[in-house]
Structure formats: C-alpha cells, structure tokens
Amino acid sequence: MLPTALWRDHLTYFARWAIIGLALAFIVVWLRPQLLTEPAPAAPVVTSFASAVRAAGPSVVNIYATGIVTETPVAQLSEQASRMLGQSFTPIGPPTQRLEQSLGSAVIVRGDGYLLTNNHVVANKDRVRAVLWDGRTTDARVVATDPDTDLAVLKIDVSDLPALAFAADGELAIGDVVLAIGNPFGLGQSVTMGIVSARGEAIVNLGLMGYEHLIQTDAAVNTGNSGGALINARGELVGINTAMFGRGRGAEGISFAIPIETARAILDAIVRQGFVVRGWLGVEVVPVQLSNSMTGEMRTALQVIRIEPQSAADRAGVRTGDALMRLHGVEVQSLEQFRSFEANLKPETPVSIELVRSGLAMTLNATLQQKPVYRAP
C-alpha cells in the first residue's frame, strides 16, 4: 500500500493534466464552435420524379383550338413589272375560307375552373376544347388574353378541379431541375426533364411578345407543349412553357417558359378586372446612340418613329424624330427596360418626358393612359 503522500502526488499530477486538457478543449470549442454541432446528414440522391409528376400531372390539360381563316389568292407581279412598279400582289380570285387547327396545353390554376395557357394557342380561334386528365372533354371560354406576355386565361365549367400549387416567387435558381409537362404533337400527356440555364433577369428577344423575361431550360418543348406546366422537383408550378429556340438556327436543347411571377400577376389581374393594367405613353421607338457634343460620350436613347393619335405622347407634344432620354426621372437604358418601366407605371400617372429635339434638350409633361387591351369576343 502506497503512503498517503505518494497518493497525494499522483492525484495532483493527474488533476493538473486534466485541468490543462479541459482548458485546451475550451479554447478549441471557443475558436471552432461548429465542432459541437452534429454533421448534417447527406441529402438523399433523387433518382425518380414520379411523385412530382403524380402531383402535377392531373392539373395539365390538352387544348384543341379551331378557327376559320379567310384567305385571298394573290399573284405576284413579274420581275420586269416589279422593277417598274415595285413589289405588289394582285388578287386573282374570290376570298376562300379554311379551317385552322392548333393544339397546345393548359394548366389548371384554380379549383373553380380557371386555366392558364399561351395566347398564341388560342388567338383568333372560334372554339377551344379542353381534354382533362381523366379523359373528359369540355368547351373552354377565353376570359381574356395578354399578347404582351403571350398568356391567356381560360374558364371551364367543371367543379372540384385539381389546381396546381405555385412555387414561391423568386425561388427558382439556375441549375434547378425542372420538368415540362404537356401534349407534344397531340401524343397525349408527356414529361421531359432539364435544368434551368438562365433566368428572366436578362431579357431574351424572341420577337414573340412584348415583355420577354423568360426562364431558359433544356427540357424538350415541342409543338403542343405550349401553355403546359414547367414544374420543380416538388411538383410546384414555376413557369408556363411558351417557345423553343428556332431549329432553323441549328439550336438544340433551348426552350423558354414564362416565370410564375409573371403568370400569377396576369392571372390575378384578368380574374379580378378582365384585363391587365399597364401604363402607356403611346409611342413606337427604336434604340439609337447619341453623342455628347462637348465630351463625345455615347449614350443610348430611343428615337420616336410613330405616335399613336390622341395618346399621352401626342397630347404632350412629342414629335416623330424626338430622342427620348428619361421617363419619369429614370434614364433610358434599352428598349426593353423602357417598355417594362412604362408598363409598371399606373394609368393616369403624371410623368415627365426628357428628350432631345434637333439637338436641343427639353422636358414635356404627360399623363399616362391605359394600354389598349384585347378583349375576348
């Protein structure tokens, strides 16, 4: 048996090192507190999107639209006559009519029968039919269309419909997996997959609509997919499929969808009041580059090439040839930026128009009007 003094020495020795160890541990934890947290479990690898398709599929319907098109047969002038008189087409017979058909898709966005689709699917069509997920067929009424965003709102008289849930605004990110659901070539409901490769912050000029803040994906979108749903991996609506990039340009795997933020705003406006509220100056403009006579600095302006009679611009005294520099205190940066800014101002808003006319700067005052809207017959 060890003497009492020796036991005391052993205990003092071990206690000293225990205190030193605890002090070191305290310092490490103070410097790296994340060491106390348990590592997050690895995210499960998604190998199937069947649950997303099951959730969204019943909300996507097939659209068949028909309309009567009147055509007048014409003959082009001969080459010699064209050189003398210019290009001209001469009627060579009475007008004829033919039945034009188009197919597309639509998304059930409200349980009381409201659908979203593309304007170009139903424009100038006399009859629109919707085929539901369970095979039922019903007439669809065009509530209103918005050609500027290529959207249209339809109404069907069917109750207890499975409305598709909307994703949160601004949630979609580049690299997210998306699924396009629609009716390509009339084959029935089909699903294609891709990722988001660009968002609507940069405007893509497809010449399809007036305001083209679009989602770019590589999910296959073909004839008949227009108006269908673009969904995320949870089966929530993130966009309305609208266009593919022209195959004639040699492009593959590039398609576009209207973001849910835009679609939601258009839907709410049409359901609430039958049209979309947009400020309108009433000018047709083209981008030009102006040079500062003192510094030589180049800047963008918009030259007026046409003024709508009795529009806000006409009443304010804007003239053809004027170069618009600022609207309502905001500097003109591009045609797209100008159009979006103009549209987001409310009708009856007093605005200042800063422009250059024959080299002289001037400011005019105008009151914006409601942009003319198309109303379904």
Image (tube, grey):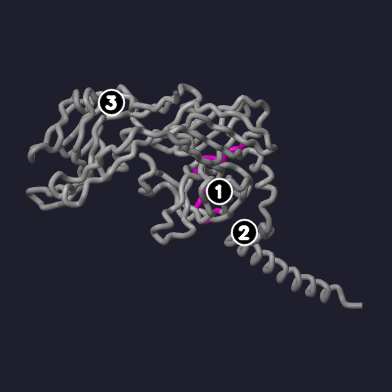
Location of residue 64 in the rendering, given as x and y in whole percent from the top left corner: 55, 37
- Residues 300 and 75: in front is 75
Rate crowding at label 2 as few (under 14), some (14 to 19) or many (20 or more) other CA atoms within 10 Å. Answer: few
Q: Quadrant where the N terminus lies?
A: bottom right
- Evaluate whether residue 40 shows in this view: no
Name the residue carrying label 2: 34
Furthest-front residue in this view: 93
Q: Secondary structure at mark 3?
A: loop
Q: Is residue 168 magenta?
A: yes
Name the residue carrying label 3: 368
The residue that appears at 62% across and 45% down in the rendered structure is: 188
The residue that appears at 18% across and 25% down in the rendered structure is: 316
Asked if 223 appears above or below 328 in the picture, the reply is: below
Say what amino acid the circle numbered 3 marks. Answer: Leu
Report, in whole angstroms, how far the alpha carbon at label 2 lies from the one at label 3.
57 Å
Start-end of magenta stretch: 164-176
* Circle 2/circle 3 CB separation < 8 Å: no
Q: Earlier in the sequence, mark 1 or mark 3?
A: 1
348 to the left or right of 300: right
88 to the left or right of 168: left
Q: Earlier in the sequence, mark 1 or mark 2?
A: 2
Name the residue carrying label 1: 185
Say what amino acid the circle numbered 2 marks. Answer: Gln
Q: Secondary structure at mark 1?
A: helix
Say what amino acid the circle numbered 1 marks. Answer: Phe
